[in-house]
Amino acid sequence: MKERIQELIKHIEEVKLKTSEEAEQFRLKFLSKKGEISTLVENFREIAADQKRETGQILNQLKQLAQQKWQEAQQLSDSTKKQSNKSAVDYTLPSEPQFSGARHPLSIVENEIIQILSKLGFVYAEGPEIEDDWHNFSALNFPPNHPARDMQDTFFIDEEIALRTHTSSVQVRLMETQKPPIRAIMPGRVYRNEAISARANCFFHQVEGIYIDKGVSFTDLKQTLYYFVQQLFGEDIQVRFRPSFFPFTEPSAEMDISCQLCKGKGCNVCKQTGWLEILGCGMIDPNVLKASGIDPEEYSGFAFGMGIERIAMLKYDVKDLRTYFTNDTRFLSQFRNY
Ligand code: PHE
């Protein structure tokens, strides 16, 4: 019997249980009620008393060894089961990128402009892109032979109807239908018959604004626009006003901001001047107020207008205006985080 036990110990030591089936076979063969070890335990009762001590020890050893082997096999198959469950869903894998759309840079800048000015009480207004001569020109004090009416600049549909060349036409529509105080901004697309280049296009986008009330002065205009560019470009920005001319404002000015790239020192973008032209503005001409039915003796107001493309070019360092309109996703997707 001793020999048989020793043989089994050797055998079990060498056995390798790889699958759960092999483990079960092993259990049946050695550890079950009818297995070899049980048989040995039964036979153990009958052996001679002087043999019992020694045989008992190795029999115990065999039993422990077999149990340990089986338990190990059991644990192994448990953990492989867990592993195979894990590989079904691997939570550590990076997720598939989800590509969301991006706002167009012009929309981003337009929204920002609207947001800043709405804090000052300017409300949003819209008007038609196909406009009549009155709203686009005559009511804005353009003399009948003014060059801006020329076929070179304006897309005419017929003698009286054209694609609007600026959103000032919406200002007229507001002044005709509302009583002061009026404080509004009018963003929108405008059209001009220009040769397409890196700096000009046959259409572009503007935001114009007006404020009409009793006692509105040039000081209000300056402070409003100063606050506006500070919000848009940063508090350290500097501004300057240069005298200019528009038929619908008197006096008129163009506002420059200090070049943000060179901080006013002079670079290629600002053509070494340290300044960048950003918008046109002025006090609304009394003739314009009168044409829309507002008494210039009682009310005064200011107006301003800017090109969104130009501001977006300065903000995002866009070199060619045409890239806004070619729908190249390599350009557009850069604005995903704005
Ligand atoms: N309408 C002018 C333009 O298109 C801009 C402007 C608006 C200038 C209001 C002064 C006052 O160029």
Image (cartoon, rainbow, N blue to C red):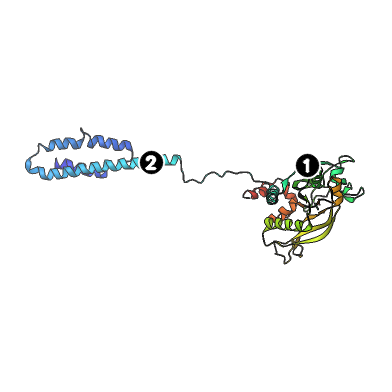
Q: Which residue is mark 2?
A: 82
Question: Left or right of 73: which side holds 218?
Answer: right
Can residue 153 be seen? no
Of the pair 31 and 190, the residue shown nearer to us? 190
What residue is drawn where x is 46% and y is 44%? 91
- Can see residue 72? yes
Q: Residues within 10 Å of mark 2 (few under 14, many from 20)?
A: few
Q: Which amino acid does the dot numbered 2 rest on?
A: Lys
The label nearer to you, 2 versus 1, is: 1
Q: Which mark is residue 224?
A: none
Percent position of residue 51, x then y: 9, 43
User: Where does label 1 land, which residue?
Assistant: 127
Determine which quarter of the picture holds residue 276. Answer: bottom right
Which part of the image, by quadrant, shows the N terminus?
Answer: top left
Nearest to the observer: residue 13 or residue 118: 118
Gap between marks 2 and 1 measured at Cα: 66 Å
- Mark closer to the chain start, 2 or 1: 2
Q: Residue furthest bottom?
A: 265
The three-letter code of the residue at mark 1 reads Gly
Left or right: where 58 falls relative to 74: left
- Mark 1 closeness class: few <14, some 14–19, many ≥20 residues within 10 Å: some
Q: How many marks?
A: 2
Q: Secondary structure at mark 2?
A: helix
Q: Is residue 297 above or below residue 24?
A: below
